[in-house]
Image: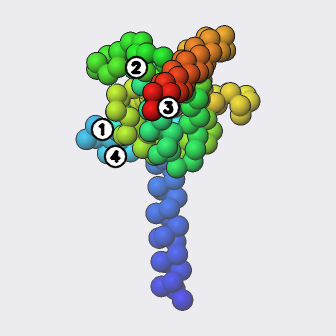
Amino acid sequence: MFKNAIHGFSTAWKGLSLTIRHLFASNAKRKITPISNDNYFKSLEGTNTIQYPKQQLPVPEVGRYQLEVEIDDCIVCDLCAKICPVDCIDIESIKATEAFGQTSDGSPKRIYAAKFDIDMAKCMYCGLCTIVCPTECIIMTNQYDRTVFELKDLTYGFSDMTPEDAAEKRALLDKQVAERQAAKLAAMNKKEGEA
Ligand code: SF4
Ligand code: SF4
């Protein structure tokens, strides 16, 4: 009984002294250290909270944060949308009547992106879209804080086409398709006439 009481007091004293030590240590501010620093987990002294957003912890270079699309380098191949496990990439493509430019890695551009939306509220940050992209134009940035008030504002649009541009390109494509079909029909009719 006496032994148990001693053990109880000793345990309580250990806990209390630890609390007191942390109480005084919490007056000191912890130095902001990147997680890549060898001493990151050794910096135990000081408060663990920081004065966000005035102070910010450095993020790891390979972290998965908000997606960004360099639309000038996108060839609208749709691979990112196809691989996305949660279907949060919504692309509406329009085939161009001819190649209209090149990406920075020299890939020819033949498809317009009338719509290129990513719903970051649905995204699970798996990074698969960035892996399959042939031109590496969809990337994960170190941006993690894009606070919004409306959920719909987490859908980011990356297309640089106006609805008028898109309508014009669709009309051009329809015209080209109709002309090609007419030419094909004329060629078939000619062949039949000659037979
Ligand atoms: S990171 Fe994953 S979930 Fe998010 S858009 Fe890319 S593929 Fe989809
Ligand atoms: S995979 Fe890359 S190039 Fe293809 S549509 Fe997506 S962002 Fe564009």
* Relative to 164, 8 lies left or right: left
Q: Which residue is mark 2?
A: 109
* Relative to 149, 134 lies left or right: left
Residue at the spot 59% in from the left edge and 25% down from the top edge: 115
The correct choice, above or below, for 117 with respect to 166 in the image is below
Quadrant in which residue 120 is drawn: top right
Viewer-nearest of labels 2 and 4?
Answer: 2
Question: Which x, y percent locates residue 177?
Answer: 55, 22
The kind of residue tagged 3 is: Glu
Q: Secondary structure at mark 2?
A: strand
The kind of residue tagged 4 is: Phe
Q: Secondary structure at mark 3?
A: helix
In the rendered structure, are the residues bearing label 4 and label 1 in contact, judged by CB atoms less than 8 Å apart? no
Q: Which residue is mark 3?
A: 192
N-terminal label among 4 and 1: 1
Quadrant in the picture for the C terminus:
top left
Q: Rounded to the nearest whole Å, what is the CA distance between mark 3 and mark 2?
A: 38 Å
Disc sitting over residue 36 in the figure: 1
The one of 74 and 36 positioned closer to us in this rendering: 74
Residue at the spot 47% in from the left edge and 45% down from the top edge: 83
Viewer-nearest of labels 3 and 2?
Answer: 3
N-terminal label among 2 and 4: 4
Q: Rounded to the nearest whole Å, what is the CA distance between mark 4 and mark 3?
A: 82 Å
* Relative to 185, 142 lies left or right: left
